[in-house]
Image: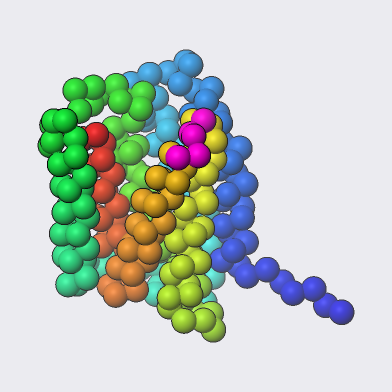
């Protein structure tokens, strides 16, 4: 009896998950004890950029023929109606959330020290590197399998959620905070995947990801 070979897309994800589970305690547990502000921010950006980009680039290059969209096409600039609808939706959701706060729409007073100063990492780098892997590679590759788009979209959104779990563990989140984050990140993964499917490039999901993270970082 032959053993079924693991799907290349999931193989790449398991590799990333294992690596990131080992790196996260170092970046978010040990490193903050020694670096703060811009040095910490740039170090986290560099770590994520090298690890995520190298893995994504390698798989996109070696499995180019098995992709729904070629690597070059991923960066074509096209923002369909889906993007604008999604953009309005996340802005409205953030706005409604702000109305429940004592001082709605007030900028965070500790912007340059929040989360140990991860301004670039949270507001920009996460959106670029995560979208390139999860939508540009994983969703792109899985879309060529014999499954429906919504099966692919749910699978990649769950994978996107799980990659955040090492950070939740390192930060010592309570069960309630875990649930709150899952209720946020999982739907966002579905939304980003839907935008990739409709546009066939990753700019819409990158811009939406950056917008969401920036609003959370600036206003909370």
The residue that appears at 30% across and 68% down in the rendered structure is: 195
Q: How many marks on residues? A: 0
**Location of residue 121 in the rendering, given as x and y in whole percent from the top left corner:** 34, 37
- Please give left or right for residue 193 compared with residue 166 in the image: left
The residue that appears at 36% across and 23% down in the rendered structure is: 116
Q: In which quarter of the image is residue 14?
A: bottom right
Residue 175 covered by magenta stretch:
yes
Q: Quadrant of the C terminus?
A: top left
- Which region of the structure is painted magenta? 172-176
* Rendered view: 48 above or below 138: above
- Please give left or right for residue 175 compared with residue 136 in the image: right
Q: Residue furthest top?
A: 34
Visible residue check, residue 218: yes
**Location of residue 123 in the rendering, given as x and y in whole percent from the top left corner:** 28, 40
Q: Which residue lies furthest to the bottom in this view?
A: 146
**Location of residue 117 in the rendering, given as x and y in whole percent from the top left corner:** 32, 25
Report the coloring of the rendering. Answer: rainbow
Q: In which quarter of the image is residue 90?
A: bottom left
Q: Main secondary structure of the magenta part?
A: loop
Residue 15 covered by magenta stretch:
no
Q: Nearer the viewer, residue 116 or 52?
A: 116
Q: Quadrant of the N terminus?
A: bottom right
* Rendered view: 92 above or below 115: below
* Rendered view: 178 above or below 110: below
Visible residue check, residue 73: no
Q: Nearer the viewer, residue 146 or 63?
A: 146
- Please give left or right for residue 173 compared with residue 101 in the image: right
* Rendered view: 30 above or below 91: above
The residue that appears at 54% across and 36% down in the rendered structure is: 169
The residue that appears at 51% across and 58% down in the rendered structure is: 159
């Amino acid at each position: 009896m032959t053993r079924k070979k693991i799907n290349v897309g999931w193989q790449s994800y398991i590799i990333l998950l294992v690596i990131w589970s080992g790196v996260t305690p170092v970046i978010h547990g040990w490193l903050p004890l020694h670096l703060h502000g811009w040095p910490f921010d740039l170090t986290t950006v560099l770590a994520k950029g090298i690890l995520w980009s190298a893995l994504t680039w390698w798989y996109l290059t070696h499995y180019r023929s098995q992709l729904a969209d070629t690597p070059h096409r991923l960066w074509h600039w096209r923002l369909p109606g889906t993007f604008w609808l999604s953009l309005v939706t996340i802005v409205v959701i953030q706005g409604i959330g702000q109305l429940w706060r004592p001082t709605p729409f007030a900028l965070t007073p500790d912007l340059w020290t929040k989360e140990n100063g991860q301004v670039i990492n949270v507001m920009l780098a996460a959106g670029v590197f995560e979208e390139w892997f999860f939508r540009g590679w994983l969703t792109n590759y899985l879309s060529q399998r014999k499954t429906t788009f919504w099966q692919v979209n749910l699978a990649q959104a769950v994978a996107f959620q799980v990659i955040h779990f090492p950070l939740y563990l390192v930060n010592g989140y309570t069960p309630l905070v875990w649930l709150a984050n899952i209720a946020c990140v999982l739907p966002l993964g579905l939304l980003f995947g839907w935008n990739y499917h409709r546009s066939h490039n990753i700019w819409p999901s990158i811009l939406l990801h950056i917008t969401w993270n920036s609003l959370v970082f600036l206003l909370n």
